[in-house]
Amino acid sequence: MVRGKTQMKRIENATSRQVTFSKRRNGLLKKAFELSVLCDAEIALIIFSPKSKLYEFASSSMKETIERYRDHVKDMPTQDSMRAEDVQRMRQLAAGMAKQIELLEVAKRKILGEGIGSTTMEELLHIEQQLERSARIIRARKMQVYNEQVEQLQAKEKQLATENAILNEKCRLQSTETKERESIFLLLEDDHEDKTSDVETELFIGQPKRRTKKDRSK
């Protein structure tokens, strides 16, 4: 017979609940004993029944095992203490970043020429050197960008010149072909006129001649 799967929830029936407690308590005590013997583990097991009845098992001394547990837990940082340390560390980090931001703001204002009334000569010379160094970097970058733009324009000019040359060559070829067609057409037209002028015709334009008797007799 297949046993049904036990649902992990409180058993409502008091008798069934007591039977299940007794069976599983004994099984748990047996497993604790076997684990201590087979693996040479120090085990202390404490069980309180629903009616507050105590059941316990200790592989050696219950008191010594509990003291060992307390010493071990005392040395381990708890989750709350770890959270407090993390919060303190984050606060210190935030305070340091705020101080750095404040110093950077002061330095920026001094570079812009603001708030330098109490600045010493050494600080002024340092600011001047920073500005000169920044100016050199900016000029170098400006020349680099200028040269890149000139190279791009030169490349564009070369491309346009090539395209213009191609278009001029196409126009020249088209013009030559048009002239050749016109010359052939003129030659054909002249030849046609010459052939037309060589044809004889008896067509007479004018008043008809009167025929005489002599002509009639013929």
Image (spheres, helix red, strand yellow):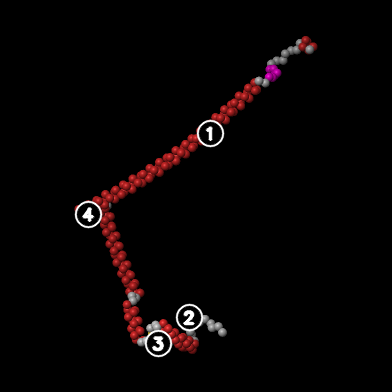
Q: Nearer the viewer, mark 3 or mark 2?
A: 3
Density class for disc 4 (Cα within 10 Å; few <14, some 14-19, many ≥20) is few
* Picture quadrant of residue 107: bottom left
Name which of mark 3 and mark 2 comes first in the sequence. 2
In percent of width and height, residue 87 lies at: 32, 69
Residue labelled with disc 4 = 123
Residue labelled with disc 2 = 8
Residue labelled with disc 1 = 174
Residue type, label 2: Met
Q: Quadrant of the N terminus?
A: bottom right
Name which of mark 3 and mark 4 comes first in the sequence. 3
Q: Secondary structure at mark 2?
A: loop
In percent of width and height, residue 178 lies at: 55, 31
Residue 171 or 53: which is nearer the viewer?
Answer: 171
Q: CA distance from mark 3 to mark 1?
A: 112 Å
Would you place residue 80 above or below residue 94 in this image?
A: below
Q: Nearer the viewer, mark 1 or mark 4?
A: 1
Residue type, label 4: Glu
Residue type, label 1: Gln
